[in-house]
Image: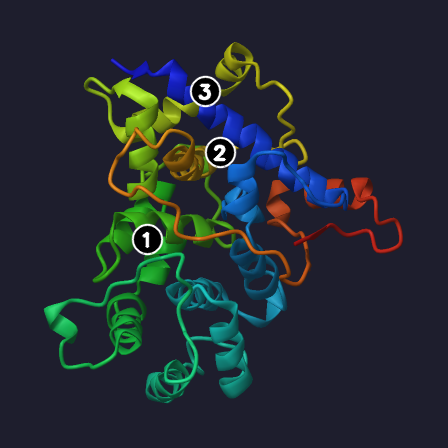
Amino acid sequence: MLKVNDEVYKYYFYFIQERMNIFWNKYELKKQPWTNDIILKENKFTNVYRASDRISQYLIKNIIYDNLDSFNEKDILFRILIFKIFNKVETWEYLENKIGPISIDNFNISEVNTLLTERMHQLPIYNNAYMMTGTHSKYNYLTYKHEKWLQMVMDEIVKEKIFEKILSAKSLDRVYFLLRERSFIGDFLAYQYTIDLNYSPVIDFDENSFVKAGIGSIRGIKKCFNTLGNSSFEDAIRYTHDNFEFYQQKYGFTEFINLFGRQPTLIDIQNCFCETDKYLRVKMPELQVDNIRIKQKYKVGKPSFNLFFPPKWNINNQIQNTCIQQNTKVLTLF
């Protein structure tokens, strides 16, 4: 039976409310400080809503929905996956500047590998948010990690018609398992990629229909729950989702304002356990579960961008109607 540790679990709901307050303070173009919490001021934390983070926003707006009619369904999925392998805007834009709009037909793997090898000797080609691996005996004949990953995509996804199977999948977990069976793609990446593909218009499943706990969220769950009993880490995520408002009321964090009427889904709940774990490393350092320090400090100064969510969520009109920048009618974040 699940049993929460109230002393710790309350910080999960505190984090969600305070991190969301930072989001709204930025939205309203308020001057810093956006929070009085020194931990949140000094360290880097993702948004409460995964889709609000900078990389997800770029993916949704610039890769999935920009020039949408120029690509077929398989190309849309292919573009998402290629971008997410590197998870870095600069790498994507470098490739598109060299070879044009990326699609399955124009993706010459030899040319792309050469371009990326040249690039990696000058600049990083991967975002440090994900620890990408490239170990598999099948691809030992290749030298670089990007060569192995891209060859895997061509051999095990394109040639094996996995995109076609994803397009005909009947559930979110089926998409997950199709990806999980590919080389290099473990539990965490398979789930993250599944959510990314689900942002697109070509598949459309309820984000609350499936969840997979990542390593970071597992650390947070271990801190927030005294015991799981016979329940899984995924059960703990669902429990938190299903009892979200109850614990907000219990702990007194009732000023949470959701994302234009959209409540956090399982992916957001999962991610927030990871972020709460990071927060607790400073707030309650005695709760040591694996990592004991936050690796990334918060930095100000990145360019602003306009918020845009999958149109099927039906919240983009809320952004336009409530934005205080009356002249531009868009929301900018930093």
Residue under numbered circle 2: 265
Q: Is residue 72 left or right of residue 282?
A: right
Q: Secondary structure at mark 3?
A: helix
Front one among 249 and 287: 287
Report the Cα–Cα distance between label 3 and label 2.
19 Å
Could you tell me which secondary element the residue under label 1 belongs to? helix
Figure quadrant of residue 170: top left
In percent of width and height, residue 38 lies at 55, 37
Between 48 and 33, which is closer to the camera in this rendering?
Answer: 33
Residue 68 higher or lower than 204, as above or below: below
Task: Give amino acid for label 2.
Answer: Thr
User: Would you name the residue on which mark 3 appears?
Assistant: 10
Where residue 141 appears, x then y in whole percent?
Answer: 14, 81
Looking at the rendering, in which quadrant would you find the C terminus?
bottom right
Contact between marks 1 and 2 (CB within 8 A): the answer is: no
Residue at the top extreme of this rendering: 250
Image quadrant where one finds the N terminus: top left
The label number, if any, that marks residue 189 in the structure image: 1
Task: Give the amino acid at mark 1.
Answer: Leu
Asked if the residue at tag 3 contacts the one at tag 1, i.e. Cβ–Cβ closer than 8 Å, the answer is: no
